Image: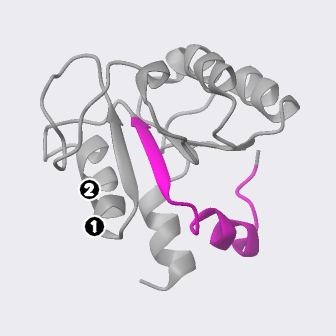
Amino acid sequence: MNLPNDAILHDIFKLETIAVIGCSTNPTKAAHNIPKYMYEQGYNVIPVNPHTTENIFGQVTYDSLAEVPVEIDMVNVFRPSSEVPTVIDTVLDRNDSNIIWMQLGISHLEAAKLAEFHGRIVIQDECLMVEHRRVMGI
């Protein structure tokens, strides 16, 4: 559950589709700016937020991960740590995303262990944008 080495991170950043649970319409929040950065880097960012019907970055916003109709490579989590077990269950139900990335301040040891047991790579308490910039030399 430590941050993978840079070679693995580099491979992770070759993936294309990122579902962002808790993606925000508010441009003052990290839950907006970090997914926006990834979108601007060419990733297919899929917002998941049941509290808005607004499109984010011109993308349809889904109420839940279960509703996303395309294959997902990574799930980026912007929800409180207490909600992580539910998020992990939803990811495991989908059977497509192999990467679960929890943003700074978000972690849940037991849920992460469950996801890893099911073959997922779990990154906790790390900023996706910071690591992307560092590893990709941006």
Type of the residue with mark 1: Glu
Confirm or deny contact between disc 2 and disc 1 (CB under 8 A): yes
What label sits on residue 25 in the rendered view? Answer: none
Q: Residue at x 46, y 48 (%)?
A: 18
- Camera-side residue: 11 or 135? 11
What label sits on residue 40 in the rendered view? Answer: 1
- Which quadrant of the figure contains the C terminus? bottom left
Circle 1 Cα neighbour tier, 10 Å, few/some/many (<14 / 14–19 / ≥20): few
Q: Is residue 93 left or right of residue 39?
A: right
Q: Residue at x 76, y 40 (%)?
A: 120
Q: Residue at x 13, y 39 (%)?
A: 26
> Is residue 37 placed above or below 25 in the rendered structure?
below
- Residue 94 screen position, x and y as percent: 63, 25
Mark 2, secondary structure of its residue? helix
- Residue 115 screen position, x and y as percent: 76, 29
- Camera-side residue: 46 or 138? 46
Look at the image and give the residue range highlighted in magenta. 2-20
Picture quadrant where residue 99 is located: top right
Type of the residue with mark 2: Lys
- Residue 10 screen position, x and y as percent: 64, 73
Mark 1, secondary structure of its residue? helix
